[in-house]
Amino acid sequence: MTFTSVSTFVTFPRGELSAVAPVVRVVPFGDGYGVVSAVTPFHPEDHTWPDQPADVGTLTLGGRTSQVVDCVIGAAPRGAAGALSIGSDVPVRRGDPGWDWYVVHLTPDDPGPAVGEAVELAVDPAHRHGLSAGHTACELVGLALNQVLAARWSKEVKPDALGAPDFDKLAITRSRITARVSVDHYRLGKSLRRKGFSAVGLADELPEAEAAVNALMAGWIAEDAPTGVRTDGPTVADPRYFCCGLRQGAVTTPCGGTHVERTGELGRVSVTLELSEDGTELRMEAKGT
């Protein structure tokens, strides 16, 4: 596959759900096709840290509407025509300055010779809102867990946006977001112990820790604090940040996903903590109801 263009402009950080833009490229991909437009409201799954699934919706070309069943990152070497890598085949992290970055809309239908034509893009709003709620809960529950576990650190480590030792960022191994749900896994191994974290007695104290995390979450949701996304630029490759104006302090932390507009939209969130039998992994689930 070859590609000659500039990085895709994205409007999902502003919460937008539709756009009309020229088609830049159409490529065969898997059992369908990948459509790249100059601008898109679709949030793609990030190949580097695939925590939030992609938006779904529709694209309309020449009066024909097709389903967008997935949306992924694409990249090509900067400056000239080059091979376009898509999804898990992209060999570098998003934002690498030697590459141009694109949003590739995957559809089962052949859009035909559409380059240069205007495509209408529409995101499924219910799907987006469910994932946004799950991702906002994920960011907040990580901050809550940091505060609850703060006394377990014997060495100074990088703090989070509210000043607590950032257990969430230092220990996390994987994260997955679904509609109004987030699940995070943390490694409690030698590396974390060398940084000064102690898990001694955590199994016995887990119910108390779980209750404390839930209490913090309930308070932050009751505040109905404003939340959103700040960006350093208009393209899919530019850094983005989760922002939240809690009474405890203003939160700004790197995050590539989408979010609700206020914490009150999360409703009731139930958090559970589970320690593996060997004590080396902590699983946290935040589930909205």
Image (cartoon, rainbow, N blue to C red):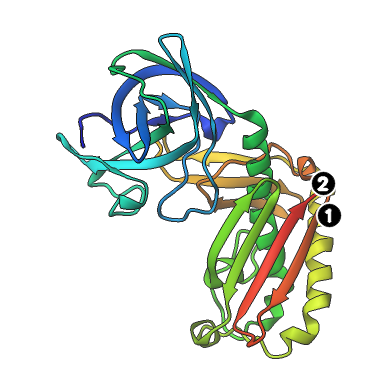
Please, is residue 145 above or below residue 112 in the view? below
- Describe residue 214's horizontal placement relative to residue 192 as left or right: right
Where's residue 200, x and y in %? 68, 90
Proximity of marks 2 and 1: CB atoms separated by less than 8 Å: yes
Query: Label 2 crowding class (10 Å Cα cut-off): few <14, some 14-19, many 20+?
Result: some
Please, is residue 176 above or below residue 12 in the view? below
- In depth, the one of 61 and 256 nearer the eye is 61
Where's residue 224, x and y in %? 80, 42
Q: Secondary structure at mark 2?
A: helix
- In depth, the one of 40 and 54 nearer the eye is 54
- In depth, the one of 107 and 45 nearer the eye is 107
Q: Secondary structure at mark 1?
A: helix
Where's residue 259, x and y in %? 63, 41
Corner quadrant of residue 266:
top right
Query: Label 1 crowding class (10 Å Cα cut-off): few <14, some 14-19, many 20+?
Result: few
- Describe residue 5's horizontal placement relative to residue 211 as left or right: left
Q: The residue under label 1 is which amino acid type?
A: Gly
Q: Residue at x 77, y 40 (%)?
A: 265
**Residue closest to the far left:** 80
Q: Residue at x 29, y 15 (%)?
A: 116
Corner quadrant of residue 229:
top right
Q: Quadrant of the N terminus?
A: top left
> For mark 2, what is the residue?
223
Q: Residue at x 72, y 74 (%)?
A: 274
The CA distance from mark 2 to mark 1 is 6 Å
**Residue closest to the far bottom:** 200
Visible residue check, residue 166: no
Visible residue check, residue 173: yes
**Residue closest to the far front:** 31
Q: The residue under label 2 is which amino acid type?
A: Glu
Where's residue 79, x and y in %? 17, 36
> For mark 1, what is the residue?
219
